Image (cartoon, helix red, strand yellow):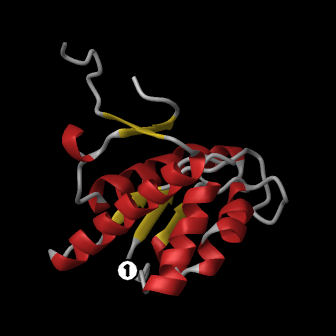
């Protein structure tokens, strides 16, 4: 029987196995782009779910020499209004859980500012959208971007 899934689903037995697989896939994307002469672009999530992935990427950086210099990152969420130094800010969260532990250049890290005036919000959004559209060089194809989850077999 053919699977009803339209997006390939990869099931892992544990959260650790999942985070390692996702981190290995991200490392593969980075290496493939570099081999092809392109700058890798990553869209990164915030919150507790990806923390294990960030830990594994940090381990790959420290122990296996995965370089993040030249990698461009985007986080597309932030609370508003929010000082980037606030304990609740995604700026601070990403710095503590990932950015400060790898060799990303600050100019290549793109987060929404939560501390701009209300009248600046539309311009900031438009600027970020333009930046994203001009930098994205890799579009995931269904066979190369499975939906990741943990759980039992189907």
Rendering coords of residue 93 (x, y %): 72, 60
On the question of residue 20 being in view, the answer is yes
Most distant residue in the right direction: 87
Above or below for 53 versus 6 = below
Q: Left or right: where does residue 106 sit relative to residue 133? A: right
So how many labels did they put on this image? 1
On the question of residue 75 being in view, the answer is no
Rendering coords of residue 100 (x, y %): 65, 78
Q: Is residue 151 or residue 121 the one in the foreground?
A: 151
Rendering coords of residue 79 (x, y %): 72, 45
Element at label 1: loop
Which corner quadrant holds the C terminus?
Answer: top left
Q: Specify the quadrant of the image occupied by residue 116.
A: bottom right
Q: Specify the quadrant of the image occupied by residue 8.
A: top left
Above or below for 46 versus 102 = above
Above or below for 42 versus 65 = above
Q: Left or right: where does residue 39 sit relative to residue 49? A: left
Q: Is residue 76 or residue 142 the one in the foreground?
A: 142
Q: Left or right: where does residue 126 sit relative to residue 31? A: right
Residue found at x 85% / y 59%: 87
Rendering coords of residue 48 (x, y %): 69, 48
Residue found at x 56% / y 74%: 58
Mark 1 burial class by Cα count in 10 Å: few <14, some 14-19, many 20+: some
Above or below for 130 versus 146 = below
Residue on which the image places disc 1: 70
Q: Is residue 112 or residue 118 the one in the foreground?
A: 112
Residue found at x 28% / y 59%: 134
Which corner quadrant holds the N terminus?
Answer: top left
């Amino acid at each position: 029987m053919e699977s009803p899934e339209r997006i390939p689903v990869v099931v892992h037995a544990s959260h650790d196995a999942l985070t390692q697989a996702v981190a290995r896939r991200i490392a593969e994307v980075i290496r493939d782009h570099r081999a092809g002469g392109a700058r890798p672009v990553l869209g990164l999530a915030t919150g507790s779910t990806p923390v294990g992935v960030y830990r594994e990427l940090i381990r790959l950086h420290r122990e296996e020499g995965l370089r993040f210099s030249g990698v461009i990152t985007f986080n597309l969420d932030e609370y508003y209004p929010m000082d980037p130094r606030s304990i609740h800010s995604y700026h601070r969260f990403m710095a503590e859980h990932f950015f400060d532990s790898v060799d990303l250049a600050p100019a290549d890290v793109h987060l929404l500012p939560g501390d701009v005036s209300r009248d600046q919000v539309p311009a900031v959004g438009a600027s970020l959208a333009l930046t994203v559209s001009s930098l994205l060089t890799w579009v995931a194809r269904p066979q190369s971007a499975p939906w990741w989850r943990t759980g039992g077999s189907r």
